[in-house]
Amino acid sequence: LTSFNAHTFLPWSQQERQAGKINTDAFVFRDVFRRTSPNMRLPKVTASFPYAASGSKGQSLVSFRDGGDLITFYSSGKGSFSVMSTSLDEKINDLALQPEIFVPLLYKLTLYSADFPRMAYTIGVDHLIPIDKTLLRLDKETLVKGPAEFIPGLSPMGSSLLVDIQGQVRSSGVYAIIQEEKLAAMLAFNYDRKESDLSVYDLSTLQDSTSFKVWEEPEETNLTQLIESNRQGKQLWRWCLILGLFFIAMEIALIRLWKA
């Protein structure tokens, strides 16, 4: 820990300590919890190593109620590591018995990297793709091959080159960046997830809208007749014709059968 300029430990302490806070702003727990309630079950330990005052303070992931850290995250150069101030023995620490915290902790720490590359990009959203300068050269001809083939634009930005796809990616798939007939990088493009948004309006919202007409009719209702009735009003001409023929028949019967 000293070689990484991190907090060192004081002697092992047989003292019960209760975790009181999860840092939901940290990379590890970001987007894991929709909300954290005050009575959320958090880890409890029966013994731990208190931190010494020396060393730089890392990013707290899970902290005790007394202000110390149960789990601390450190970055060092291009690497990173996390430190737990106690054992994972279930008799001492019940963190492993709480999968809602333990599983995302292990998963995110495994994926974490200071320069972790994106695995996929979105068509119509991501136009400038950063590629490490060690993979591409600005003075060489570059070609993108995949469902479409084109020459991208290149511009320097720090230790990276920005590959400008110029809106020429319209089909999903994997695209290869070729320079001097050698593979420099691979890019995957997917369609925007908004096109598959399955969210729906609440029925009461639609009923109050002036742009929609909502019918709550039985399933056996003739929808075509319902729409025609809504557009043209109720069609009464058939009844008028029937009544007209009925009264004409009555008049003929009266004329023939009525005796003066």
Image: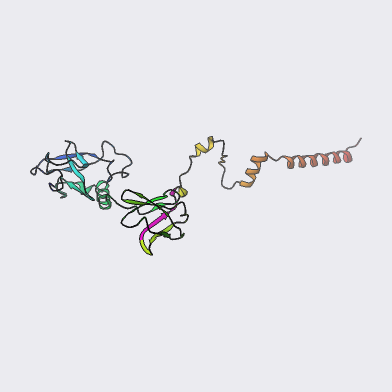
Percent position of residue 255, x then y: 88, 39
**Residue at left offset 50%, top offset 37%:** 205
Residue beneath the point at 89% across and 41% down: 256
Answer yes or no: is residue 222 visible.
Answer: no
**Position of residue 230 measured from the top left corner of the image (x, y, whole percent):** 64, 40
On-image quarter of the C terminus: top right
Q: Looking at the picture, tell me which residue is in the foreground, 188 or 221.
A: 188
Which segment is the magenta one?
184-193
Q: Nearer the viewer, residue 41 or 110?
A: 110
The colour mode here is: rainbow
Spot the residue most to the left: 11
Q: Residue 112, position in %: x, y? A: 27, 50
Q: Residue furthest bottom?
A: 181
Q: Is residue 101 left or right of residue 152?
A: left
Looking at the picture, tell me which residue is in the foreground, 137 or 124: 137
Q: Residue furthest right?
A: 260
In this view of the protein, can residue 77 be seen by the observer? Answer: yes
Q: Main secondary structure of the magenta part?
A: strand
Residue 255 vs residue 74: left or right? right
Residue 227 in percent (x, y) is at 63, 43
Seen from the viewer's position, the closer of residues 49 and 134 is 134
Residue 185 placement: quadrant: bottom left
Query: Count the marks: how many?
Result: 0
Q: Is residue 10 one of those drawn in magenta?
A: no
Give the left or right position of residue 17, taking residue 166 as reference.
left
Q: Is 12 displayed left or right of 56 in the figure?
A: left
